[in-house]
Amino acid sequence: MAAQHSDFWILERKNRRQTAILIAVFVVLFGALGFGLDVLFDNVEFFNGTIVGFPILTLFALLIGGVQSVASFYGGSSLVLASVHARALKPDEEPKHQMVLDVIREMATAAAMPVPKGYIINDPAPNAFATGRDPAHAVICVTQGLIDQMDREEMQGVIGHEMAHVRDYDTRTMMMIAVLIGGIAMLADFAWRWAWFSGGFRSRRERQGQGNSGDTGAVIGLAIVILTAVAPFFSQLLAMAVSRQREYLADAGSVEFTRNPNALLRALGRIAETESPLRDASRGTAHMFIVNPLEGANEDQESFFANLLSTHPPLARRIARLRAMSGQGASAAAPGAA
Amino acid sequence: MVAPTILLTVIIVVGAWGILIYNSLVALRNQVQNGWRQIDVQLRRRHDLIPNLVEAVKGYMQFERDTLTQVVEARAKAVAAPDTSSRIAAENQLTGGIGRLLAVMENYPQLKADQNVARLQEELTTTENQIAFARQAYNDSVMRFNTRLQTFPSNMIARNTGFEPADYFKGAPEDQAVPKVDLSMSAPRA
């Protein structure tokens, strides 16, 4: 278990690095788009291999990118919660809501972490996610469907999984991915719309039929704008690859907290039986949930391409891994058996 | 001139390394102490809850006098315990008693209808779980701390700076036999 502790530091460092890379890529993309626009608007020109002119739009785009990164870091979790229409859990609404809040507190104790806030989505599809920039600002959000279908032990398994995301700082990375991918998509959308309305990727001077110095510039501008357009796709691929591996790790973390693989095992099995997708989940937030909210669990595909394009490993494989843990884990299942 | 420089460098490096180890041991010891405080908070909460729960259920459970009395007595013993080891023994006894009480309560459907009892029951259930998880986290931190005290090279620093190994919070032997409390107040299975 001493090893587990250092594993957690490694995970946290990895997450910090990935978040930094993500922000850097985001800001560079913004800058690149700004530069592409600068070229197209003839703010800068290529003259004998040097760049002439003042790239005002580039600087402006970099500024926006930076500001949006900072805003995402501090406001990302409220943005995510608002986009899935989540509201704070209140203990007196329903006895089982009190139970969920209690289980969140129990798992925080098991993880020796601050107690996250509890949120709820009014949706019958059983699902859950966690968000927040660090454990002190963490939020764990469950659906009404999860509350209705899980007993206390299964709820511990699910919340334990979310608690592991919080401890490993997955919540920060996932939150930044959710918000910044949204930003990149908007950016690409804007670039294409602008190109459409301005009648193609030609510089102003070209359109007015004067000179050919714009040619190189237009090509570069076009390349950059295309790059921005495919960026959302690649950033999404990255998000998926990053999040798939994390689901296994969080499953293992849940077992570490509850010392009871059967809890999460039963919960995932129960979720696998339901087919309804979650209403308010989108491509931007799908990777945050404990199971893919966009498809019924029965559509779980095993093929390579399905894997590549999925934010979650197939439920069947996660269940198999947990079963392996519970099979050999008779000694590990006893609390305080240290 | 070269030899003293090398010697000085070695002394500085070893000294800095010793300070780092010492600090990490202090951090681990603080974790252990904090872990104990977490358990303590939950145990006290349990002490406060029991009189209320006993008061609320005693009308319904006339036939379970023994169970109720056991819980009340174990609580009194735990509250009055003069030192840590006797307190741990009394608390373990109390854990067993509450486990039995919560199990027996399942036989009284009228209890579930009583909102006050249901609320107290949830509170006691979560407190029991909190105690179990706090104990688990505490024992993990004790293991990390003691391992550092016993393994090379940190044991050399620990030996000369007065670190004492911490004690595990051991459960009662019967405790292992009692199944984990699972009292979902309403568990509609889909």
Image (cartoon, grey):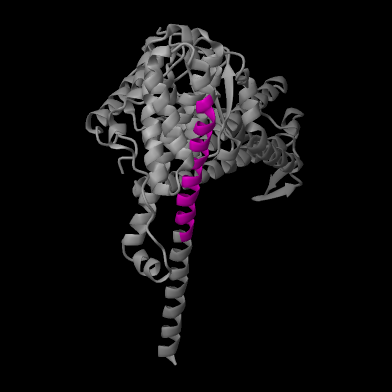
Q: Residue at x 39, y 42 (%)?
A: B88
Q: Position of residue B105 (x, y in %)?
A: 41, 15
Residue A307 lies left or right of residue A294; in this view the side is: left
Q: Position of residue A324 (x, y in %)?
A: 25, 29
Residue A181 lies left or right of residue A327; in this view the side is: right
Find out whether residue B27 is within the magenta segment. yes
**Closest to the observer, B23 or B137:** B137
Q: Position of residue B133 (x, y in %)?
A: 42, 35
Identify the main secondary structure in magenta: helix
Q: Residue at x 35, y 48 (%)?
A: A3
Question: Quadrant of residue B22 in the image?
Answer: bottom left
Residue farthest left in this picture: A328
Find out whether residue B66 is within the magenta segment. no
**Closest to the observer, A303 or A99:** A99
Residue A171 lies left or right of residue A77; in this view the side is: left
Q: Position of residue A290 (x, y in %)?
A: 45, 24
**Closest to the observer, A58 or A6:** A6
Q: Quadrant of the C terminus of chain A?
A: top left
Look at the picture and state if A337 lies above or below A299: below
Residue farthest bottom in this picture: B1
Look at the picture and state if B117 lies above or below B4: above
Q: Which residues are magenta?
A: B26-51
Tally of numbered discs: 0
The answer to whether residue A246 is seen in the rendering is: no
Look at the picture and state if A135 lies above or below B143: above
**Closest to the observer, A203 or B79:** B79
Residue A218 lies left or right of residue A324; in this view the side is: right
Look at the picture and state if B151 lies above or below B141: below
The answer to whether residue B1 is seen in the rendering is: yes
